[in-house]
Image (cartoon, rainbow, N blue to C red):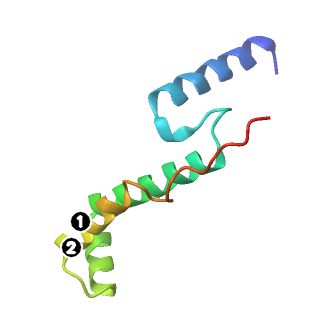
Amino acid sequence: MQASDRFNINSQLEHLQAKHVGTGHADLTRFEWTVNTHRDSYASYVGHYPILSYFSLAENESIGRERYNFMQKMLLPCGLTPEREDE
């Protein structure tokens, strides 16, 4: 692999990370990554009607109630941010 190839790959990765929030970066904590993953999952559940209807059937709730519950879970999907320990 040549140096120019490495530079090109790194610039493409930086562009991808700037364009899409959930792709992560070097300073991303485990908590932030988990929050992004949970929010992406909930957004997918709300956006795809068959999945939403499956969840509503499984939990014996209306589709509107399930949509509301998932949107509420998107606010704090993993609870409050843990305290950081500065080194």
At label 2, the amino acid type is: Arg
At label 1, the amino acid type is: Tyr
Residue that badge 2 annotates: 65
Horizontally, is 64 left or right of 76 in the view?
A: left
Q: Element type at marker 1?
A: helix
Q: Are marks 1 and 2 in contact (CB under 8 Å)?
A: yes
Q: Residue at x 42, y 56 (%)?
A: 76
Horizontally, is 68 left or right of 8 in the view?
A: left
Give above or below for 44 relative to 27. Answer: below
Give above or below for 55 relative to 4. Answer: below
Q: For the residue carrying disc 2, how many other residues have a C-alpha within 10 Å: few (<14), some (14-19), or many (20+)?
A: few
**Rendered image quadrant of residue 74:** bottom left
Quote the CA–CA distance across marks 1 and 2.
5 Å
Image location (x, y in percent) of residue 27: 66, 33
Residue that badge 1 annotates: 68
Give above or below for 4 relative to 37. Answer: above
In this view, which residue lies farthest toward the top? Answer: 4
**Rendered image quadrant of residue 29:** top right
Give above or below for 13 relative to 54. Answer: above
Image location (x, y in percent) of residue 66: 26, 72
Horizontally, is 86 left or right of 39 in the view?
A: right
Q: Element type at marker 2?
A: helix
Image location (x, y in percent) of residue 30: 65, 49
Choose between 79 and 60: the one closer to the eye. Answer: 79
Q: For the residue carrying disc 1, how many other residues have a C-alpha within 10 Å: few (<14), some (14-19), or many (20+)?
A: few
